[in-house]
Image (cartoon, helix red, strand yellow):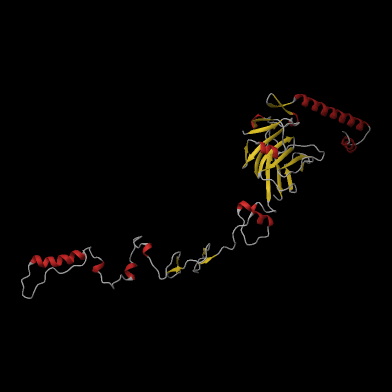
Amino acid sequence: MGTISKQYTFSAGATIVASEHNANFDDIINVVNGNIENVNIKSTAAIVDTKLAQITTAAKVAFSALTVASQASGDIAYYSGSAWTRLAASTESNYFLKTQGTGGSAPVWTSLPVSGFASSAEVVTGTETAKAVAPNTMVSHQGVCKGWVNFNGTTGTLSAADSFNVSGLTDNGTGDYTVTWDTDFGSVNYCLVGACKDIGSAYFVQIEQSAGLAAGSSRVQVKAHDSSTGDSPVVCVMAIGDR
Amino acid sequence: MTKVRVYTDYDPVRVLVGIKNHNEVAPTDELALKSGLSGNFLEIEGSELPTSREFRKEWCVKNGKVEIDQDKVAKRIEKEDGLKQKAIKAKNVFESLGLDKDALMAYLKDLP
């Protein structure tokens, strides 16, 4: 509707015609009843806070319309316990917002306690103290098991129950097996241990005499003290070393 | 069941099983090389292998199949029977001489 103006002005003593009288009031009524625009409101007028507090329907205030003093790109808003407050954007890259519990302390920007991820070489060296270890390099550490297998040596086809870093099993004969490692060791100077389920005599897992340890495989035997070999339903082999 | 490779130039034959991510997979030439295997091989389903390992030392390949070499089995049993007979004889001799079990075991330990 916009700004309205009085259509008819009556001088003193003039006869008031009904239609003119109604026309003056109709404009006012029309504006008040749903057509008030910005121009119809006094520039210094404002809706008092108590009226805003009466808004109960969700999403009546657009979040995008909110403003706060000194706001800047990247700012974060948080509730301080008494009011919504602005936390200025961090001037550092790769910082994270650190919450400080439920005690009401304001969140702060902070750096991670580590300076990135260690390389495989750094994991092998094992002296780095400021870097984190990613799962894909964890196995590089000298103290970590590089490969293991638990298999059944009594079946026609050797069957691995579970394994890590094993790409093959060879059945060389009774109680005589070769474990092939998926990723090779750096040399033959790794440590191999084995155990097997009791098969009724004093059997143990040992490194086979002639082939022994190779960088990519380990030949082991389930052997008794009298040098006879036997098949065990559970043969476990584990190796630790550099690679 | 997955394919396995049976390397036939060994006595007894050797059987290679491939593993990837805990699962059985068909072996490759690279795996065989790393496993120290070479020579002729037969690729068969794992289910085609004998299920019993009682005669594992006598596994051989005949007509494209892994079988138990019955001649070898007979020879081994004969040899084992011979040893048993030897042991029984020795036991009888020792007992007739009034010797005890420990002495018998000490004797048996030295048998070939």
Q: Is residue A204 visible?
A: no
Camera-nearest residue between A148 and A92: A92
The residue under the point 63% across, 52% down is A137
Is residue A26 left or right of A144 when viewed as pictured? Answer: left
The residue under the point 24% across, 68% down is A39
Q: Quadrant of residue A232?
A: top right
Residue A157 screen position, x and y as percent: 67, 34
Q: Is residue B65 visible?
A: yes
Residue A121 screen position, x and y as percent: 66, 55
- Outermost residue toward the bottom in this view: A12
Q: Is residue A222 above or below residue A190?
A: above
Is residue B31 left or right of A96 when viewed as pictured? Answer: right
Q: Quadrant of residue A162?
A: top right
Q: Is residue A172 above or below residue A62?
A: above
Residue A74 screen position, x and y as percent: 45, 64
Q: Quadrant of residue B57?
A: top right
Camera-nearest residue between B17 and A203: B17
Residue A145 screen position, x and y as percent: 68, 50
Q: Is residue A131 above or below residue A242?
A: below
- Quadrant in the picture for the N terminus of chain A: bottom left
Is residue B44 left or right of A84 when viewed as pictured? Answer: right
Q: How many marks?
A: 0
